[in-house]
Image (spheres, rainbow, N blue to C red):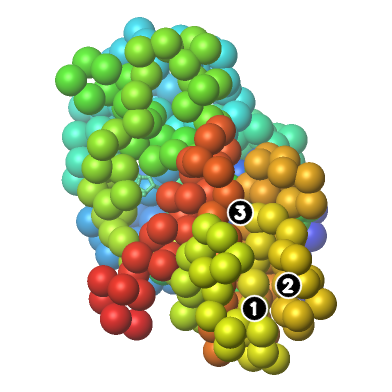
Amino acid sequence: MNIGNDVNRAAFLLQQGRMVAIPTETVYGLAANVFDDLAIQAVFERKGRPLDHPLIVHIGRWQDVQKVTDQMPEQLARLADWFWPGPLTLVVPTSPRFKSLCTAQQDTVALRMPNHPTTLSLLQALPFPLAAPSANPYTRVSPTQADHVSHYFPDLPYILDGGPCTHGLESTIVGLVDHRVTVLRPGALSLEEIQKIEPEAVLHEGIANRAIPGNRTLHYAPRTPTTAFDHWDELPQWAETERIGIIAASTPKTPGAFPHLWHLTPVGDLQAAGRNLYRQWIEADQLQLDHLFIQRPPRVGMGIAINDRIDKACGQRTEQGH
Ligand code: TXA
Ligand code: MG
């Protein structure tokens, strides 16, 4: 069996230069020793990810920050103090000593301390940080449960099972742009939370596409063609047929009319919607329906990241035609 909760086995494999899927509070990652370029290259290849799309470095000890950077800007250090371990990734300048394929030759590195007890103990048992992208094939929806990972990659050496992810959306990526704390990718930590510590923090303007390297519109796409909608009256008549799925952010007047209906959240709880989104999306995708409709929740709090992922999944189809 290649799924279990054996931290020692995961640590052993990682020390051998193998890749291991790890749980985090956001989504599952596909991890390898950050200093082992062969192992990192294997992660890029396994995911089918272009080499110009950098990976996040995961640490489990504060002193490991120095392994990657010696210039943590003060505003970002404050955010780390407040939110680590947690769903916050910081983009910082790399130290001249830090060489890894994971940065895709950027002079910055994305760094985070995840808040998951199993992965924290794994990181603390290892002498090196772990580079890990989300554990999905390139352009597919990120996994939030161990069985999603094994569905995507049945033959991984090991999947460390830490249960369902409590946030279910990727971490929020924050860096400095013109000296200003800027959200480069909205995620599980809302802008409002960040602004409690850094009131001047802003969302990057080009957020949908080019705020971060490699972040193409093609991201987060389910295989089923997907269309976003706001109001129920926008749905075409043919949405009420057998081969159509609906992920809903509110209750339709006639729920019985839709044979495949998922509720992002029954009570308008956007945290729950974030937790449910990818799981429902993956379930819908596995049914191989003809079309999926997904309703946008309000663009506040966690709703900003949810809308970002929905826009990316649907934008791809109109811009690139598949
Ligand atoms: O929640 C998460 O962040 C998950 C878990 C596993 O930690 N990881 C994740 O990794 O979402 P990934 O590889 O799917 O997305 C990493 C993002 C990419 O869009 C990449 O462009 C950005 O991080 N990134 C990495 N290094 C960067 C850098 N130096 N500057 C700006 N963005 C960077
Ligand atoms: Mg990803």
- Within 8 Å: ligand 2 and the Cβ of disc 2? no
Residue 74 visible here: yes
Q: Position of residue 216 (x, y in %)?
A: 29, 59
Disc 2: which residue: 261
Q: Position of residue 240 (x, y in %)?
A: 66, 84
Query: Residue, x 72% and y 44% (percent of image)?
Result: 268
Query: What kind of residue is marked 1?
Result: Gly
Query: What kind of residue is marked 2?
Result: Leu
Quadrant of the image for the C terminus? bottom left
Tell me the quarter of the picture where residue 106 sits.
Answer: top left
Q: CB of mark 2 within 8 Å of CB of mark 3? A: no
Secondary structure type for disc 2: strand
- Marks 1 and 3, how far apart in space? 25 Å
Q: How crowded is mark 1: few (under 14 residues within 10 Å), some or many (20 or more)?
A: many
Query: Residue, x 47% and y 27% (percent of image)?
Result: 191
Numbered mark located on residue 28 in the image: 3
Quadrant of the image for the N terminus? bottom right
* Mark 1 or 2, nearer chain start: 1
Q: CB of mark 1 within 8 Å of CB of mark 2? A: yes
Tell me the quarter of the picture where residue 243 sits.
Answer: bottom right
Label 1 or label 3, whichever lies nearer to me, is 1
* Mark 2 or 3, nearer chain start: 3
Residue 188 visible here: no
Label 2 or label 3, whichever lies nearer to me, is 2
- Within 8 Å: ligand 1 and the Cβ of disc 3? yes
Q: CB of mark 1 within 8 Å of CB of mark 3? A: no
Disc 1: which residue: 245
Q: Is residue 307 above or below residue 314?
A: above
Query: Residue, x 53% and y 80% (percent of image)?
Result: 236
Secondary structure type for disc 3: loop
Q: In this view, does 65 lie above or below 164?
A: above
